[in-house]
Amino acid sequence: MEEINFYIEEAKEGMANAITHLDDELKTIRAGKANPAMLSGVMVDYYGTLTPLQQVSNVGTLDARTITIQPWEKAMIGPIEKAILTANLGFNPQNNGEAIRIAVPALTEDRRKQLVKQVKSEGENARVSIRNARRDANEGIKKLQKDGLAEDLAKNTEVEIQKLTDTYNKIVEELLDKKEQEVLTV
């Protein structure tokens, strides 16, 4: 019984990690509104060490179309600006000597369609991770069955793992639908 619970918990954990990763990836896909999470992957050269942008400055939104970056040290304005350009996010940072502002351009229809494809691709990656967690758990149950686990107990466990898979796949669908609507809303 303990081994069965181990495989079920391992599958849950793998599926939950897939959802967390999907959620993080969807946050970086911009939907026309300014969001500090758009810059979460930007790494700044902070005195020779690559450091996340959020650790060398305060990142916020001024309005629905403007991201502001207030460095904690004025000397960091140049490296932050360079890091944003290097990250190739399609933004053009403007600095006024005190802070950096990024105007988030409105999305074109073609760009929206590209972003929807990207959202669907991330969703498929999450589904693959969920299926892999299911497969790993089912293989573990089959090994236990070869070692003497009752067949009906093994089948019931596989059914339970499939229910978990269905539940997590439904969460993926909900996240994708929500993000797709957000991207397509003008």
Image: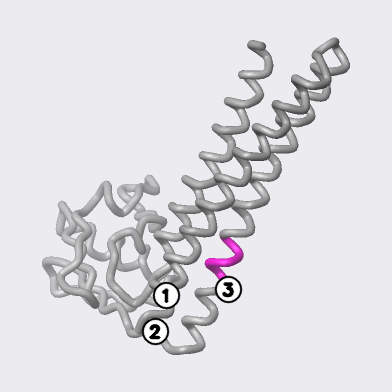
Left or right of 162? Residue 126 is left
Which is nearer the eye, 98 or 150?
150
**Type of colouring:** one colour
Residue with the most extreme left position: 98
Q: Position of residue 15 (x, y in %)?
A: 57, 40
Query: For numbered disc 2, what is the local secondary structure?
Result: loop
Identify the residue under disc 1: 183
Q: Are marks 3 and 1 in contact (CB under 8 Å)?
A: no
Give the percent coordinates (x, y) of residue 120: 58, 66
Cα distance, mark 2 to mark 3? Answer: 14 Å
The quarter holding residue 35 reads: bottom left
Q: Residue at x 51, y 88 (%)?
A: 110
Magenta-drawn segment: 117-122
Q: Is residue 144 above or below residue 107?
A: above
- Callout count: 3
Q: Residue at x 26, y 79 (%)?
A: 103
Residue annotated with mark 2: 107
Please tell me whether residue 125 belongs to the stretch shown in magenta.
no
Q: Quadrant of residue 77?
A: bottom left
Q: Which residue is mark 3?
A: 117
Furthest toward the front, the residue is 152
Instruction: From the viewer's side, name the closer residue of 37 and 174.
Output: 174
Helix, strand or loop for disc 3: helix
Residue type of the residue flagged with mark 1: Val
Q: Residues within 10 Å of mark 3 (few under 14, many from 20)?
A: few
The amino acid sitting under disc 3 is Lys
Indicate whether 177 appears above or below 73.
below
